[in-house]
Structure formats: structure tokens, C-alpha cells
Amino acid sequence: MSKNKAVETENIQNNVVELKNAVIRHQENIVLKDVNVEVAKGEFIYLIGKVGSGKSSLLKALYGEVNVTEGYVFAVGYDLGKIKSKQIPFLRRKMGIIFQDFQLLSDRSVYENLSFVLKATGWKNKKAMDARIREVLTQVDMVHKGYKMPHQLSGGEQQRIGIARALLNEPELILADEPTGNLDPETTNDLMQLLLKISESGKTVIMATHNYGMVDKYKGRILKCEDARLKEESSVEV
Ligand SMILES: Nc1ncnc2c1ncn2[C@@H]1O[C@H](COP(=O)(O)OP(=O)(O)OP(=O)(O)O)[C@@H](O)[C@H]1O
């Protein structure tokens, strides 16, 4: 048993994410309360809601950026209410995080952006790293662009690299915060197809978005942040 196993916890229903009576807050300000939700392996979830309704805060609670002080918040084997800061890197190795503004390192190539993450997460064998980088670049259809610098790529291509980076360590869960927020409709469509394909391969995807047209077009489960609560919705008004 690895040293980190000790802080991991079982989920009886085998959920990838589970919140029970959870409260998400910034200091004394409550953003979401009475949050009760279970997310099973392979689900594709849209997280919707107005500006400032708590979508990013909920995602941040799941990746250990916002502390959980009340209720139960579980993700990829970790109880976020009990996790210690030194265990956060291990939590994040089991999830891939995709940001609206891509967050690629601008001073190095696509390949180096990816090898940087592999090295930081304990990979040492150069051949294995090369092979893994080739695999994820193939998955996002960017295998010939490894030598490019981020500024030499379009926004959509940069986000493909953001997705490739998220896939590097075979995460169980992908958290995407407005991943298409900076992209045109056609590129948004292409990236949605890619995220859906990733979800169909068995990964769980939780995506915060304002793009209700997309939510309507590509079916998924819809969770809405509204009035400080997380509600299940059957459809969106476009
Ligand atoms: N670091 C922080 N410190 C204090 N308050 C914060 C912090 N981050 C967000 N908030 C507040 O928490 C609330 C929820 O913000 P959050 O960013 O989660 O909303 P959101 O639904 O993701 O919004 P958007 O659609 O604009 O991304 C807002 O009132 C915001 O001002």
C-alpha cells in the first residue's frame, strides 16, 4: 500500500464525486449550501448558472483550491474535508483540470509544456514520457505540433494542448472551467466533440459553461448553481 493510500477513502457506491450537505464558502461568505450530488464514472455533467453563482468555486473545492469546512465532499478517492495540503498534488494527479485561458507556459514549446507536467508528477523514463506525450497529442489531433510555441497556435489549438495536458496522467475525472469561453462557435463545436469522446472512453467530465446552446445540443446531465443551491435540471432554456 502506498503512503498516500492512507488518506484515500472508499466510496461505497463507487461514485467519482459525491457531496453531502456540503457548504462551499469563501471566508465567511457562503457561495453554495446544502449541496447533495453523486456523480458516477463516465457521466458528462454541465455545470451552469449565472456569473458569480458558484460554478468555479465548486470546481475549486473538488481540486483542493477552496477549503471544505462543512459537509462531505469526495472526489477521486479523497475526502476533501480531511485532505492535508501535502496530499493535494496526489489528488490532482487523479484529475485533469482545463481552464478558460488555457494556462500554457508561454516560454516553452508544446512538447516541453507536457514534459514539464510529466516530470513534476514523477515521470523519469524519457522513452515512456515521449510515448505518452505522443499519445495525448494524437488524442487531441495535434501530434505534429509538439515543436510549436503556444503563441504560434490558435486559441482552439492551445485549448487542445490544455486538454492533452489534462489527459497526461490518465485521470478519472476531468474538471473544465469554461473551456470554450474564449473560442468561436466552430472551434467550440470541435472541442465539445473531443470532450464527449473523452467522456465516452469512461472518464467523468464536469464542465462549467455559460454556453446554453451547447448544453442543448450535446446531451449531458445538467447541474445548476442558483440561489446558493445546486439543482438538477432536465433542460436549459436557450
Ligand atoms: N477567492 C475568492 N475570495 C472571495 N470570494 C470569492 C473568491 N472567488 C470567488 N468569490 C465569490 O464567490 C462567488 C462565486 O464565484 P464563482 O467564481 O465561483 O462563480 P462562477 O459561477 O464561477 O462565476 P463566473 O460565471 O463568472 O465564472 C462570487 O460572489 C465571487 O465574488
Image: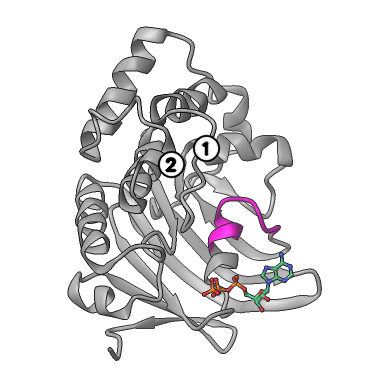
Q: Residue 113 placed where, x, y %?
A: 47, 30
Q: Residue 216 placed where, x, y %?
A: 22, 79
Instruction: Evaluate if marks 1 and 2 touch, with contact meaning CB atoms under 8 Å apart.
Output: yes
Number of residues whose C-alpha sits closer than 10 Å to that of mark 1, classed few (under 14), some (14–19) or many (20 or more): few
Q: Residue at x 68, y 45 (%)?
A: 83
Residue stretch rendered in magenta on the structure = 59-67
Give yes or no for residue 91 being in the magenta stretch: no
- Mark pair 1, 2: CA separation: 7 Å
Residue 106 numbered mark, or none: 1
Q: How is the image coloured?
A: one colour
Q: Residue at x 40, y 50 (%)?
A: 174
- Residue identifier under label 2: 151
Q: Residue at x 28, y 89 (%)?
A: 238
- Compare residues 54 and 77 and report the one nearer the observer: 54
Regarding residue 155, the answer to whether it shows in the image is: yes
Q: Amino acid at mark 1?
A: Ser
Number of residues whose C-alpha sits closer than 10 Å to that of mark 2, classed few (under 14), some (14–19) or many (20 or more): few
